[in-house]
Amino acid sequence: MPDKRNGEPGARKDLTLDLGNGVTLKLVLIPAGKFLMGSPQTETGRSNDEGPQREVTISEPFHMGACEVTQAQWRAVMDTEPWLGKMSGKPGADHAASWISWNDAGKFCEALSKKTGKRVALPTEAQWEYACRAGTTTAFCCGDDPSILGEYAWFQDNTRKTGEEYAHPVGRKKPNAWGLYDMHGNVWEWCRDWNDKEYYAKAGNVDPENTTETQFRAVRGGSWHNDPSRCRAAARNSWTGPNYVHYNYGFRVMVASRP
């Protein structure tokens, strides 16, 4: 089917960044638009900090990493391997980089911005959820039924329960409708916002972003360690500070449409 997301049939205008040493990072163009952010009170596994559900406008298109940042991409930019020797830190060039704090992810974005001349950053919570949903209103990008989640995600049923307790290679599962992989599961993904339950409930409806400092940073998507309820599009983790690191924490990047 032709892709009309960018205004003309077949047009994609995706972006590929050269990280050096033969390593690249692909980003998908996400269109501006509106979506329902948060979850309805009837959604299985819902937490109170996911509402009230409201219509949110993303006013400008942006590029979103097609996959989570991999170990090879992290090494190419940062020349470190924070997962080595750590619990569940299985090495693999295409495995999602893990043991990454919010502050670490920010340093990666700064370094990659300098290397490429692009404005690389973490996505806001609103951008992340909008991109994850890809036009859907269900618990997952593939619907409400968790029995098919394994086709799209690495989560506890196909990792912990099979003895594979580590971040897996990216891009091996089905993508969502906008060509993004692993938005559910594999590693929790840091977002740009500070995490504040009160702010989330009263945030504006156009490009919301919590810039007021709190103890915590926003993180989305669930991980290989989690059950389906934690991997929903609206699920939020509310207790992680900017220096927190763990075996199932990583990130993906976005590039703003304006220089």
Image (cartoon, helix red, strand yellow):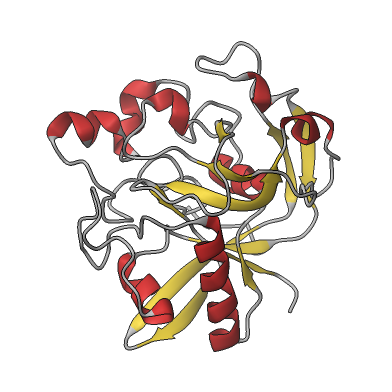
Which residue occupies the foreground of this view, 37 or 225?
225
Relative to 2, 89 lies left or right: left
Which residue occupies the foreground of this view, 224 or 55?
224
Residue 14, can we see it?
A: no
Relative to 24, 136 lies left or right: right
Q: Residue at x 66, y 25 (%)?
A: 49
In which quarter of the view is residue 78 placed?
bottom left
| Residue 76 pos. (x, y %) | 37, 80
Residue 88, can we see it?
A: yes
User: Up-down: is 120 above or below 58?
Assistant: below
In which quarter of the view is residue 149 placed?
top left
In which quarter of the view is residue 98 placed?
bottom left
User: Up-down: is 69 above or below 172?
Assistant: below
| Residue 163 pos. (x, y %) | 13, 36
User: Up-down: is 237 above or below 48?
Assistant: below
Relative to 41, 163 lies left or right: left
| Residue 31 pos. (x, y %) | 67, 56
| Residue 71 pos. (x, y %) | 32, 67
